[in-house]
Image (tube, rainbow, N blue to C red):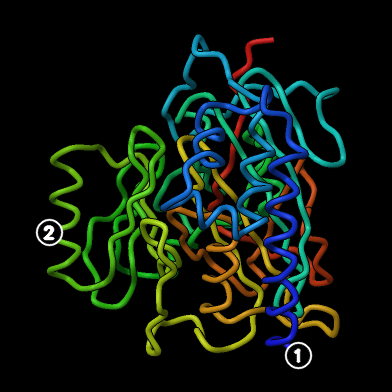
Amino acid sequence: MRKTARFCWGFLSVLLALSLMFLIPSAAMTEDARRQYSNPDGDSLRSLLNPRAVLASAVFSDILPSANVVSLPVELFTPGNTPIEENFTEDGYRDDTIIVELAKERMYDSDVYIAYVKIATPSQLRTAIAGTKISSERTNQTSAISSNYNGIVAINGDYYPNTSGGYIVRMGETYREHTSDNLDLLLIDEWGDFHLILRGHDVQENGVAAFLSEHEIVNGFFFGPALVVDGEKRDIPEDYQFAPNADNPRAGIAQLGTLTYALVAVNGRTDNSQGVTLAEFADIMAQLGAKQAYNLDGGNSATLVFHGQVYNDKPQDERDVTDIIYFASATEE
């Protein structure tokens, strides 16, 4: 059944992608989007054969956030600015500093919930914890933490107290600095760019040193695996933790381009949505056009929140977690 679905999807992919070239007004495109459609090689070809990636690009093609936006403080316990309530719709949110567009897909016999996000400054990509100090194991629901910090859209993090390794950094505050032979790292720099460092003590020691020679770690996560690296879907190691070959609910985050991201939650363990393996999750991220993508804490922790409510509409009760990733407005209105 999955092979048939993939064949049909591949055929429809070409038709939809080609039709979008004529349906999207050229005057509404940014220069980056224009280059994707006009350049016939490299990433552009992948986009033309990948309608989900084209749609993700189209979501933001008519937006050019102001260059005069004031950055938010890079401080762990400082919330984002209060969003404009009347700007929320069922499908997203927009102001002069951020765009959020929501989508739901059916992939691998599972419900996939996506929040596409474009921000004006890197400071709008933020993290928060349930407690009052980064070492705390206090927990709370993703929706509650997001509301406490004025999050427009949020996803659960890596549940850092549940492990003993990794580079755990939240809004510039460092809690732990350890390499690992078992798990991949995600480091986010001062420009909001993702850097994925694969497992292995030597690999991570050298990778972190190279990173720190050019950047600072604003946020660092320890869970994984890396799903997409530099635009290429990763092969998932058979011995990676977190049941890589089992169908489970999953949560992850991807960078699609400069200051452009996707938060993704896949429902699972129900009759209507079985969940996905990590290899399938990597394929989902690749289909969305991810340049970099990383797996976060899954299972019942997998929760995508929009406007303070659980967006992925899972039947299980919302689980308490220690930390979240969220996007906030920088508007001063």
Q: Residues within 10 Å of mark 2 (few under 14, many from 20)?
A: some
Reading the chain from its start, which is encountered first: label 2 or label 1? 1
Place residue 174 in its image quadrant. top left
Q: Where does the image place residue 323, in percent across and percent down from the top left? A: 53, 53
Numbered circle sitting on residue 53: none
Residue that badge 2 annotates: 206
Question: Is label 2 in a helix, a strand or a loop?
Answer: helix
Spatial separation of the CA atoms under disc 2 and disc 1:
44 Å
Residue that badge 1 annotates: 1
In depth, the one of 260 and 200 nearer the eye is: 260
In depth, the one of 310 and 23 nearer the eye is: 23
Question: Is label 1 in a helix, a strand or a loop?
Answer: loop
Q: Amino acid under label 2?
A: Asn
Place residue 264 in its image quadrant. bottom right
**Quadrant in the picture for the N terminus:** bottom right
Residue at (58%, 42%) from the top-left corner? 326
Check the image and report above or below for 320 versus 149: below
> CB atoms at circles 2 and 1 under 8 Å apart?
no
Residue at (52%, 27%) from the top-left corner? 31
Tell whether 235 sits left or right of 288.
left
Q: Amino acid under label 1?
A: Met
Q: Where does the image place residue 200, in percent across and percent down from the top left? A: 21, 73
Residue at (28%, 55%) from the top-left corner? 176
Q: Where does the image place residue 148, in percent across and percent down from the top left? A: 66, 37
Check the image and report above or below for 232 versus 235: above
Check the image and report above or below for 146 versus 142: above
Residue at (66%, 56%) from the top-left corner? 52
